[in-house]
Image (cartoon, rainbow, N blue to C red):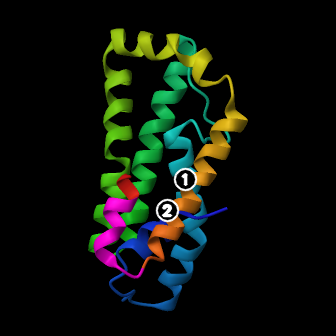
Amino acid sequence: MYSLIAIVIAFVWIGNDRVCMGQEYKCDVEQPKADQLIKEMFMFAADKQKFPTNETEMKQFCDASKQREKDLKRYGDTCLQNMEKTVLNLFVYSVVKHSVGVCKFKRRGLEFQQMGKCGNSDRKTNKKCWNDWMATLAGIANTTNDKLKIPLACW
């Protein structure tokens, strides 16, 4: 299993100037939690978060989405350098905006719930797809030609 946070850092590694070893240790401990938050945020790879299919699940989804966003922002502010933090924010931006939209507007929330059964139907295959994607990104992160990293990631 590849760590999304480690891949993001490898993409834009510019040095690690944390103030003290305690902070570095805390960030190392928090990295797997941040990876899990991202998986849950993207839902199709989630271990816990399922697509909501009713009003109760929708409320739980919205509350959990807000908390994940706060926790990831705190992790980025505490543990990532400027460029790493920017890449993480860009990576999760569209998911956060989508979640805000389906939670704020009733019609969009109902449409999201209607597709929930389909979204929940084959979680094992979805997780395999996610893991394959993480492996691909890890390979791209190890590419020595920095100018190829973004084009390869978009291909």
The three-letter code of the residue at mark 2 reads Leu
Image x and y of residue 52, in percent? 56, 21
Can residue 79 be seen by looking at this rendering?
no
Residue 61 to residue 76: above or below: above
Residue 126 to residue 25: above or below: above
Magenta includes 119?
Answer: no
**Mark 1 surroundings within 10 Å by alpha-carbon count, few (fewer than 14), some (14 through 19), many (20 or more):** some
Find disc 1 in the rendering and name its residue: 133
Q: Is residue 117 left or right of residue 71?
A: right
Q: Main secondary structure of the magenta part?
A: helix
Name which residue lies at 56% across and 67% down.
30
The three-letter code of the residue at mark 1 reads Trp
What element does badge 2 sit on? helix
Find disc 2 in the rendering and name its residue: 137
Kindly check if marks 2 and 1 are in contact, taking CB atoms under 8 A apart as contact. Answer: yes
Name which residue lies at 51% across and 90% down.
21
Image x and y of residue 73, in percent? 37, 56
Residue bounds of the magenta highlight = 144-152
Magenta includes 149?
Answer: yes
- The one of 14 and 96 positioned closer to us in this rendering: 14
Residue 112 to residue 137: above or below: above
Q: Is residue 26 left or right of residue 82?
A: right
Image x and y of residue 137, in percent? 49, 62
